[in-house]
């Protein structure tokens, strides 16, 4: 009778569980996304199916399937599966797992897999207790973390584990997940509602199913299909119209605002894009391009700022990375502007495609191989470091383009001073140079 009641309670608990838990995959084929790791024939899938998985760390944003993947492994392995959280586990817990693993291996020949969630929070005493078991193969460690393990996971654990990066779920994977959720809830949803849920998910499958479960409950109470307002209520946000045309129009307004040095307009369009679910990577890429295209040598630091922002987007992720993006927008919008880098490269490309053979002058040709000297390669080349100024007048281009000028500095920002210093350091084309002792 007790077993009967327990079984009934388990069924009811399952029925009332959040949608994400009810739909948690139990087989590899049920996992959406992560094809680069789990598609047939991929190394991770092969290791799981053959039950030969070594210690690994699953790294990726929330809702990408790290815990789900560990639980699928638990169902497929013949080894004993233990689970601890690095946040709450004590050294005593770790030692107990190792002792039980040793007994299990000695008595039954059965290995042990330890799934350690939030592995980046593992402190030194916990690590000291666990490392011997990982080193001698007593246990196989599966760690899960949302943080970059190259920065956040202890070096000793990281060096003994293979890192697998789980990517945010793409639109196709999220759409498939939503369809499963709708089937489980026995309800339909409008196309606008589904699209808003995908746009606002940030690639987080758990968030999608959680919001869908809430929206389904609201819609059922109203005896309705899931509509846009149900998703808005579940997410606590309003939908912003942002179709394909809006994507290109808004990014165009964003770039032109920064190019026009309107910092507030740049921040406004940034906010519009972020609220509409625009890809932070896409925004960061455009800022990196703008830093050279519209600012360039007027403020060389702008490219460094833009590149650091792109790296921060990858390292931190949204929503926190919105601060990095905003800082970049403010810096780039307030920086002096110059398009001389753009005009210079296009002028040089036109010249490179123009008339002439483009032959490399003999004094610039490679002279390091046998027989090169006999061909005159390198003859007459002046090594700049043997001259006091670190520069010597000589021709570096084919004769047919030797007199062409591509880079014409602007009078903005740091560009004039840099150009004046460049000319001063060379003392003019006819300046005499002092040769240093070699």
Image: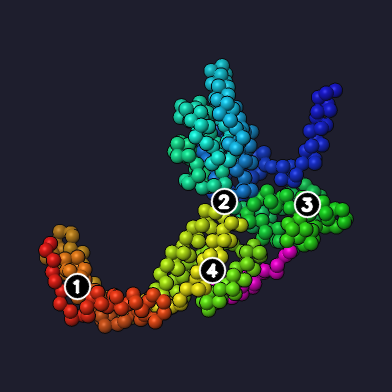
Q: CA distance from mark 2 to mark 3?
A: 25 Å
User: Which x, y percent locates residue 135?
Assistant: 46, 29
Q: Quadrant of residue 266?
A: bottom right
Image quadrant occupied by the N terminus: top right
Question: Pointer 2: what residue?
Answer: 167
Tag 2 and tag 3, C-beta contact below 8 Å? no
Question: Pointer 3: what residue?
Answer: 214
Residues shaded magenta: 238-255
Whether the magenta-drawn stretch holds residue 365 is answered as no
Q: Earlier in the sequence, mark 4 or mark 1?
A: 4
Tag 3 and tag 4, C-beta contact below 8 Å? no
Question: Pointer 4: what residue?
Answer: 329
Q: CA distance from mark 1 to mark 3?
A: 73 Å
Element under disc 4: helix
- Which numbered circle lies on residue 212? none
Q: CA distance from mark 3 to mark 4?
A: 36 Å
Q: Which residue corresponds to the image point at 55% horizontal and 54% vertical from the top-left? A: 316
- Which of the two marks, 1 or 2, is nearer to us in this view? 1
- 200 or 332: which is nearer to us? 332
Question: Pointer 1: what residue?
Answer: 392
- The answer to whether residue 331 is above or below residue 86 is below
Mark 2 surroundings within 10 Å by alpha-carbon count, few (fewer than 14), some (14 through 19), many (20 or more): many
- Which of the two marks, 1 or 3, is nearer to us in this view? 1
Q: Quadrant of residue 77?
A: top right
Q: Earlier in the sequence, mark 1 or mark 3?
A: 3
Q: CA distance from mark 4 to mark 1?
A: 41 Å
Q: Which residue corresponds to the image point at 50% horizontal and 61% vertical from the top-left? A: 309
Q: Earlier in the sequence, mark 1 or mark 2?
A: 2
- The answer to whether residue 167 is above or below residue 338 is above
């Amino acid at each position: 009778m007790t077993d009967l009641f327990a079984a009934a309670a388990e069924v009811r608990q399952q029925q009332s569980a959040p949608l994400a838990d009810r739909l948690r995959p139990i087989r590899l084929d049920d996992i959406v996304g992560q094809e680069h790791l789990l598609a047939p024939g991929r190394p991770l899938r092969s290791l799981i199916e053959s039950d030969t998985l070594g210690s690994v760390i699953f790294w990726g944003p929330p809702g990408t399937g790290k815990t789900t993947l560990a639980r699928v492994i638990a169902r497929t392995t013949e080894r004993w599966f233990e689970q601890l959280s690095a946040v709450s586990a004590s050294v005593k817990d770790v030692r107990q797992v190792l002792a039980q693993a040793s007994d299990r291996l000695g008595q039954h020949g059965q290995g042990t897999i330890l799934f350690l969630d939030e592995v980046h929070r593992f402190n030194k005493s916990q690590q000291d207790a666990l490392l011997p078991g990982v080193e001698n193969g007593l246990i196989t460690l599966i760690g899960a973390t949302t943080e970059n393990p190259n920065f956040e996971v202890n070096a000793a654990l990281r060096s003994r584990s293979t890192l697998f990066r789980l990517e945010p779920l793409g639109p196709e994977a999220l759409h498939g997940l939503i369809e499963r959720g709708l089937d489980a809830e026995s309800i339909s949803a409008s196309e606008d509602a589904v699209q808003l849920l995908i746009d606002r998910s940030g690639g987080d499958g758990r968030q999608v199913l959680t919001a869908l479960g809430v929206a389904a409950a609201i819609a059922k109470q109203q005896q309705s299909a899931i509509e846009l307002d149900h998703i808005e209520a579940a997410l606590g946000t309003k939908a912003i119209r942002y179709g394909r045309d809006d994507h290109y129009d808004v990014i165009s307004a964003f770039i032109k605002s920064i190019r026009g040095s309107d910092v507030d307009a740049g921040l406004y369009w940034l906010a519009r894009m972020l609220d509409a679910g625009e890809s932070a990577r896409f925004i960061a890429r455009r800022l990196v391009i703008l830093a050279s295209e519209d600012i360039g040598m007027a403020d060389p630091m702008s490219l460094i700022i833009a590149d650091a922002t792109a790296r921060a987007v990858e390292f931190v992720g949204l929503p926190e990375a919105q601060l990095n993006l905003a800082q970049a927008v403010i810096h780039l919008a307030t920086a002096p502007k110059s398009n001389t880098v753009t005009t210079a490269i296009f002028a040089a490309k036109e010249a490179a495609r123009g008339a002439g053979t483009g032959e490399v002058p003999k004094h610039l040709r490679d002279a390091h191989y046998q027989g090169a000297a006999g061909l005159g390669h390198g003859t007459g080349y002046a090594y700049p470091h043997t001259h006091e100024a670190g520069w010597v007048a000589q021709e570096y281009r084919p004769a047919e383009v030797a007199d062409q000028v591509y880079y014409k500095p602007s009078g903005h920002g740091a560009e004039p001073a840099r150009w004046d210093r460049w000319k001063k350091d060379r003392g003019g084309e006819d300046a005499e140079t002092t040769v240093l002792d070699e």
